[in-house]
């Protein structure tokens, strides 16, 4: 953070030893406060607000901060790289991230609960979202998609796979099952129910209507 023309003097100041320095020495600062500037150590300097985090009072009310801190009295921690996405620097190199962000510098988007089934977490207009593979949907890509649809209260359990209620079959649960087959060309239209062709009737289309 700083290079000193007189490192021994700095060490003495840090140790709190009595100084018998003749005059001043010059150093340069590249502290993140702003423009690099030359400065002068004054052994008698007083800083109204104590220099925090090991900072050194080098002139009246001027602190030279130790690595990782900045601000008038070195009260602010610095993070390099800077905390991204609204994260706050807690102590040197340690960011506290906004919800939805993670990683050392809050540079990573995190989706609460994660993304399942190969979904990828990504920021969409600044909001973390799971981007799902084509056959999955839902906030975490937890819901399978059945493009054919699952009819008759069937449930899509995996991409393209319906789980059907008893009495229904087929990829979309669209085929009714009649345990006793419909007779005389009748059609099974729902579980156990036949639609008969004239002149037949009855539960299994087994009766011939006499009027015909
Ligand atoms: C620093 O402050 C002290 C006390 O206020 C004062 O006596 C001294 O002259 C000041 N030094 C400089 C270089 O201004």
Image (cartoon, rainbow, N blue to C red):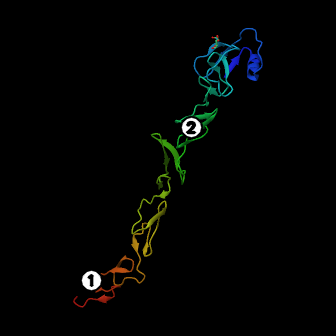
Disc 2 secondary structure class: loop
Pick the quarter of the image with the C terminus: bottom left
Quarter where residue 154 is shown: bottom left
The residue depicted at 63 percent of the width and 27 percent of the height is: 69
The residue under label 1 is 198
The residue labelled by disc 2 is 107
Label whose residue precedes the other's in the sequence (1 or 2): 2
Q: Residues within 10 Å of mark 2 (few under 14, many from 20)?
A: some
Q: Is the CB of the residue bearing disc 1 within 8 angstroms of ligand 1?
A: no
67 is higher (above) or lower (below) than 165? above
Disc 2 C-beta below 8 A from ligand 1: no
Residue toward you, 184 or 126: 126
**In the figure, residue 23 lies in which quadrant?**
top right
Q: Residue furthest bottom?
A: 210
User: Which image quarter: residue 11?
Assistant: top right
Horizontal relation, residue 82 to residue 18: left or right: left
Give the percent coordinates (x, y) of residue 71.
Answer: 59, 24
- What residue do we see at 55% from left, 36% from top? 87
Question: Which of the image's four quarters has the N terminus?
Answer: top right
Residue 181: where, in percent of width, then height?
Answer: 40, 82
Q: What residue lies at 65% left-to-right and 28% top-to-bottom? A: 68
Residue projecting furthest to the top: 23
- In this view, the residue in front, 150 or 123, is 123
Residue 186 visible to the viewer: no
């Amino acid at each position: 953070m700083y290079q000193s023309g007189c490192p021994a003097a700095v060490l003495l100041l840090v140790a709190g030893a009595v100084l018998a320095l003749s005059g001043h020495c010059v150093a340069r600062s590249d502290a993140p406060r702003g423009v690099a500037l030359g400065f002068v150590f004054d052994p008698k300097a007083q800083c109204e607000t104590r220099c925090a985090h090991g900072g050194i009072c080098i002139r009246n009310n001027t602190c030279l901060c130790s690595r990782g801190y900045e601000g008038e009295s070195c009260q602010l921690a610095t993070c390099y790289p800077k905390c991204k996405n609204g994260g706050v620097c807690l102590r040197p190199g340690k960011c506290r991230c906004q919800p939805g962000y993670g990683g050392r510098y809050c540079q990573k988007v995190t989706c609460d609960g994660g993304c399942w089934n190969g979904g990828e977490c990504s920021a969409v207009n600044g909001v973390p979202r799971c981007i799902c593979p084509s056959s999955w949907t839902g906030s975490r890509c937890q819901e399978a998609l059945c493009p054919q649809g699952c009819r008759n209260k069937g449930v899509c359990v995996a991409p393209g796979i319906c789980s059907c209620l008893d009495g229904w079959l087929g990829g979309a649960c669209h085929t009714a099952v009649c345990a006793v087959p419909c007779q005389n060309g009748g059609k099974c239209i729902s579980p156990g129910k036949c639609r008969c062709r004239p002149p037949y009737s009855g539960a299994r289309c087994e009766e011939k209507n006499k009027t015909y």
